[in-house]
Image (tube, rainbow, N blue to C red):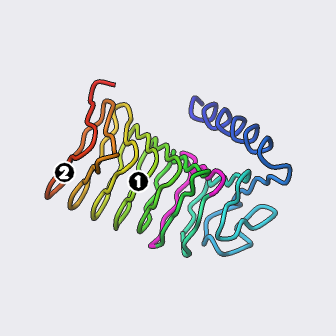
Amino acid sequence: MMRAKSVIKYLFIILALSTSFCSDAMVFSVEGDGKWTNQTNWDGAFPGKTNFLGDTIVIDAFITLNTDITIEGVVLVTETGSLLGNKQIEISPTGTLINEGNSIVKKIVNNGLIVNRLILECTGDLLNYNTIKNYETVLVGSSIYNTGAINGDGGQYFSGEVLINQLKGSLSGNIDICAATNVANFGKLDSTS
């Protein structure tokens, strides 16, 4: 019940923000399990490959990501949802990915905001140029490259190869970091915030 209240709270905030940015804002939701590109999986309209500023996509079923997507608005994967596929997600500076379910993709390029509350996995690289807030588990098959802010409270980051925190990057909060090969820190490291 607490998770349902959390999702409702997120949706209310997302909708309020979305409508303030764009009068043509849309909310897309799935009707059942299936492929992202299958238009019959979507309740009403099909969001396409780009989620535009002001738009919100709610995923509360098992969706196979069978195409690269760009997030300019908000994508919410609920605790009953999954976003799985061998494709890339690119999050623009205005974009937000909120993951409360299980999401596994090939690669993530983050220029916006990621909030992870369960399992977020990349089989390839995770490139972070803005902000990741992690409260559970981020698994990366290859490398994590950070020039933004990686933080969280109780979250774990696992990299199959290396984690490179560039000069402008910061790692902060109560987080655990594990890299199979190396953690290279050239930026800010603060485990007290």
Q: Where is residue 113 in the image (x, y as percent from the top left)?
A: 52, 46
Structural crowding at the residue carrying mark 2, measured as other residues with C-alpha within 10 Å and reported as few (<14), some (14–19) or many (≥20)? few
**Spatial CA span between label 1 and label 2:** 15 Å
Residue at horizontal 65 percent and vertical 75 percent from the top: 37
Residue at horizontal 40 percent and vertical 37 percent from the top: 135
Quadrant assignment for the C terminus: top left
Q: In this view, does 169 lie to the left or right of 67?
A: left
Query: Which label sits on residue 184?
Result: 2
Identity, as a three-letter code, of the amino acid under mark 1: Asn
- Name the residue beneath numbered marker 1: 128
- Above or below, comparing residue 64 to residue 24 in the picture: below
| Residue 133, image quadrant | top left
Residue 103 falls inside the magenta stretch: no
Q: What stretch is highlighted in magenta?
A: 72-86
- Above or below, comparing residue 125 to residue 185 in the picture: below
Residue nearest the viewer, comparing 176 with 146: 146
